[in-house]
Image (cartoon, grey):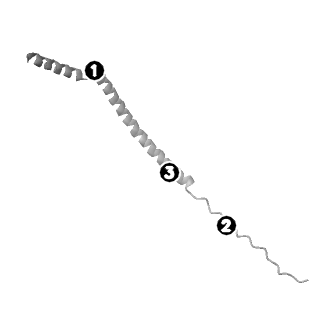
Amino acid sequence: MKKLAALCLIAAIFLVLSCQESAQVKAEREKMAEQIKALEGKVTELGAKVEQLTADYTKHYEEFHAKKAPAKPEKPAPKAPAVKPPTRK
């Protein structure tokens, strides 16, 4: 029974020690967290730039392209040639 208890105690200690994060893994996780924060900042910045470009495009489109060309005056339909009545000879 003592051997089984000692074996369980050793296994529990080994399990706890093997499940702890190493310093290298912690450093890598912190580095990734910093990169994520930097990328989130860039996404926010790019979102603002996209909104500005969309506003500029809309303004440009409304100013130069949205106006319809002035309507061309319609040409009157050509008149049919006058038909002369038949003449007797």
The residue shown at (34%, 28%) is: 32
Question: Image height check: is 51 above or below 34?
Answer: below
Residue type at tag 1: Ala
| Residue 75 image-quadrant placement | bottom right
Residue type at tag 3: Thr
Q: Earlier in the sequence, mark 1 or mark 2?
A: 1
Which residue, given by chain and number where applicable, does mark 1 sit on? 23
Task: Give the side of residue 73 with respect to residue 19, left or right.
Answer: right
The residue shown at (80%, 77%) is: 83
Which residue, given by chain and number where applicable, does mark 3 sit on? 58
Residue 21 picture location, percent across and down = 25, 23
Label 2 vs label 3: CA separation?
Answer: 32 Å
Residue contact between numbered discs 2 and 3, judged by CB atoms under 8 Å: no
Q: Residue furthest bottom?
A: 88
Task: Give the side of residue 76 with respect to residue 50, left or right.
Answer: right
The residue shown at (50%, 51%) is: 58
Label 1 vs label 3: CA separation?
Answer: 52 Å
Q: Earlier in the sequence, mark 1 or mark 3?
A: 1
Label 1 vs label 2: CA separation?
Answer: 83 Å
Q: Quadrant of the C terminus?
A: bottom right
Q: Quadrant of the N terminus?
A: top left
Residue contact between numbered discs 1 and 3, judged by CB atoms under 8 Å: no
Question: Image height check: is 60 above or below 38?
Answer: below
Residue contact between numbered discs 1 and 2, judged by CB atoms under 8 Å: no
Residue 66 picture location, percent across and down = 55, 56
Residue type at tag 2: Glu
Q: Secondary structure at mark 1?
A: helix
Question: Image height check: is 68 above or below 75?
Answer: above
The residue shown at (48%, 45%) is: 53
Q: Earlier in the sequence, mark 2 or mark 3?
A: 3
> On residue 71, which mark appears?
none
Which residue, given by chain and number where applicable, does mark 2 sit on? 74
